[in-house]
Image (cartoon, helix red, strand yellow):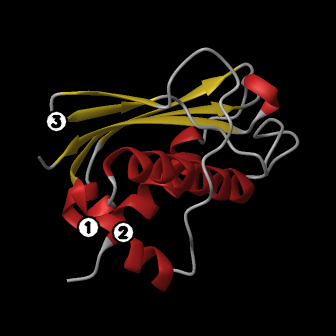
Amino acid sequence: MKTPEEKLAELGLELPPLRPMLGDYVRCVRTGNLLFTAGQGVDEYHGKLGRELSLEEGYLAAQQSMLNLLSVIKHEVGELSRVKQFVKVLGMVNSTEDFTDQPKVMNGASDLIGKVFGEKGKHGRSAVGMAQLPNNTAIEIEVIVEIEE
């Protein structure tokens, strides 16, 4: 059976280095076997979906945000194979008032989780539009994952 890291490599993707923290917080908090991450934006995509950014760019931004989150998870637990289950994904999409495809944008993150983790990647999800996000990032995602002890 292939590890999540091997599956990422097969997809031609790699985990990025941890992004610098821009405030007084921690990247994640572990309580029991649950890991709650802080939100992760992206460095490559800035602006509003529905104005500066296309749906396709939003999808790629969500994928990149999830890769940033996977880096945080790996840093915390050592190996991505310790993820027992993705529990919840919250996606906040920087979008115009009339943009209503936030779920399609978030598919970039959800599709990646499914390809890498299979059944363990099935999760509850919320995809919401935001008037603005820090540094005008296109997206910010946070997750809750259950970790194998």
Residue named by callout 2: 116
The residue lying toward the viewer, choosing from 77 and 35, is 77
**Looking at the picture, which amino acid does disc 3 mark?**
Asn
Disc 3 and disc 2: Cα gap in Å? 21 Å
The residue under the point 49% across, 80% down is: 9
Q: Is residue 54 left or right of residue 34?
A: right
Category of crowding for the residue at label 2, using alpha-carbon neighbours closer than 10 angstroms: few (below 14), some (14–19), many (at least 20): many
Element type where label 3 sits in the image: loop
Instruction: Tell me the amino acid under the disc marked 1.
Output: Gly
Q: Tell me the element at label 2.
A: helix
Are discs 3 and 2 less than 8 Å apart at CB?
no
Q: Are marks 2 and 1 in contact (CB under 8 Å)?
A: yes
Disc 2 residue type (three-letter): Val
How packed is label 3: few (under 14 Cα within 10 Å), some, or many (20 or more)? few
Furthest toward the left, the residue is 149
Residue at label 1? 118
Residue at the image point whose x is 30% and y is 75% from the top: 3
Mark 2 and mark 1: span between their CA atoms? 6 Å
